[in-house]
Amino acid sequence: MIVTADQKRRIVLPKPVQPGDVLDISVVGKRMILQVLQKPVAIPPQAGRALDPSLLGATDLDEPAFLPLTDESPA
């Protein structure tokens, strides 16, 4: 589809674009790409569950979970 801008640099978007839609404009070289962004879908909250104490029985919470990335020791 080819559109022409008016004197105020406005264009008419095609029918699938509805009022309130959010568009992403990407510039690639001399081309402009308009992409309609999807509205986020709310995820319903989930009730928290208590941890099973037997899973944490053998875990030492004072020991680091991973090796340090450098040879530097904490100050």
Image (tube, helix red, strand yellow):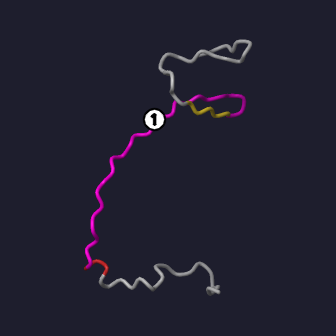
Q: Position of residue 57 (x, y in %)?
A: 29, 83
Coordinates of residue 61 in the picture (x, y in percent) = 41, 82
| Magenta span of residues | 28-53
Callout 1: helix, strand or loop? loop
Q: Residues within 10 Å of mark 1 (few under 14, many from 20)?
A: few
Q: Which residue is mark 1?
A: 39
Q: Position of residue 32 (x, y in %)?
A: 65, 28
Q: Judge whether 15 appears above or below 55 on screen.
A: above
Q: On the rendered structure, is 4 left or right of 50?
A: right
Q: Quadrant of residue 9?
A: top right
Q: Quadrant of the N terminus?
A: top right
Image location (x, y in percent) of residue 49: 27, 64
Residue, x 67% and y 17% (percent of image)?
10
How many numbered marks have been drawn onto this rendered protein structure? Answer: 1
- Give the vertical position of 54 relative to 10 (above or below): below
Query: Camera-side residue: 1 or 19?
Result: 19
**Depicted 59 relative to depicted 18: above or below:** below
Q: Is residue 64 above or below residue 12?
A: below
Outermost residue toward the right in this view: 7
Q: Nearer the viewer, residue 16 or 29?
A: 16
Q: Main SS type for the magenta part?
A: loop
Is 45 part of what is drawn in magenta? yes
For the point 46% across and 79% down, which residue is it?
65
Assign the C terminus to one quadrant of the image. Answer: bottom right
Q: Is residue 28 left or right of residue 50?
A: right
Point 47% across, 20% down: residue: 16
Location of residue 25 by image quarter: top right
Tell me the kind of residue under disc 1: Lys
